[in-house]
Image: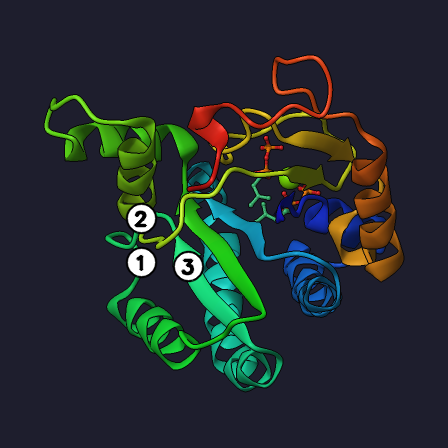
Amino acid sequence: MHVAIIMDGNGRWAERRGLPRSAGHRAGARAVRRIVEAATRAPVDVLTLYAFSSDNWSRPPQEVASLLRLLKRYLVSETARCLENGVRLNVIGRRDRLSPDLVRTIEQTELLTRGGQNLQLRLAVDYSARAAIAHAAVLTRGAPCSPQEFERKLAEAVHSDVGVPVDLLIRTGGERRLSDFLLWECAYAELVFVDSFWPDFDETGFDAALREFARRDRRFGGLSRALPPSYSRAE
Ligand code: IPE
Ligand code: IPE
Ligand code: MG
């Protein structure tokens, strides 16, 4: 099962406490640790977390810098825990606008954790679904290709080794929109919107979202309990 999460609400969480937005992002990083651990205990094979969108570059430079610093610190400090828990880490998105130092850290973490069998953790950084789809189209060089081949190009476009459809998309923070996240992969995703801000999201909330997903009747355009259509079926 593939779960994707739009981790939203760090800034508002901090503002409510009279704290700077960067404090909200730090609290958000603690929530990431909790939810990754919860996912390793749940029947989740792939967890994709939206950490920094391509449109987030438009925030004030200090906020962008604090987010990217936090990401680097997370990668360095979590490698050991990933190895212990069988977590394979993969950063998806563009890399050409990240600092060479951050790219090196990403590559090292991916290399060290590549044997993880329990959970694939994908962090979306400088990620835009529309840019990824446009890039995948360029990679096909105009040649006709099967849906499965196109999904491989889409994965390649964002430095991912799998292109699996999303089963459950969770967004915290009360907004009900996709904000350019996994537009292709979410074709038949079940959507769960949660009002709590990301730093307050915990295992109880995660389990509740999984239970809500289990109650949904997925039809994929068919009548009941149908198989996913070829575009969203993992090979
Ligand atoms: C989500 O929290 C984290 C990122 C987008 C990087 P926000 O920073 O968007 O928090 P709000 O939505 O302003 O509360
Ligand atoms: C989406 O949240 C991006 C991440 C969670 C990384 P935003 O806060 O950037 O989205 P909008 O601006 O509310 O659509
Ligand atoms: Mg937000």
Tell me which colouring the rendered structure shows: rainbow
Amino acid type, callout 3: Val
Q: Earlier in the sequence, mark 1 or mark 3?
A: 3
Is residue 18 visible in the rendered image? The answer is no
Query: Which quarter shows the C terminus?
Result: top left
Q: Name the residue that disc number 3 marks.
A: 91
Q: Is residue 203 above or below residue 57?
A: below
How crowded is the residue under tag 3: few (<14 C-alpha within 10 Å), some, or many (20+)? many
Judge by depth and name the residue closer to the eye, 100 or 137: 137
Question: Could you tell me if the residues under marks 1 and 3 are in contact, i.e. CB atoms within 8 Å?
Answer: no
Q: Is residue 122 above or below residue 72?
A: above
Q: Of the numbered discs in the image, which one, if any, rests on residue 3?
A: none
Question: Could you tell me if the residues under marks 2 and 1 are in contact, i.e. CB atoms within 8 Å?
Answer: yes
15 to the left or right of 57: right
Q: How far apart are the alpha carbons under marks 2 and 3?
A: 9 Å
Ligand 1 found in image quarter: top right
Q: How far apart are the alpha carbons under marks 2 and 1?
A: 8 Å
At 86% from the left edge and 44% from the top edge, which residue is drawn?
211
At 65% from the left edge and 65% from the top edge, which residue is drawn?
29
Task: Tell me: is circle 3 under 8 Å from ligand 2.
Answer: no
How crowded is the residue under tag 2: few (<14 C-alpha within 10 Å), some, or many (20+)? some
Amino acid type, callout 1: Leu
Location of residue 55 (image quadrant) = top left
Residue 50: x percent and y percent? 55, 48
Local SS, label 2: loop
Q: Name the residue that disc number 2 marks.
A: 94
Q: Of the numbered discs in the image, which one, if any, rests on residue 98?
A: 1
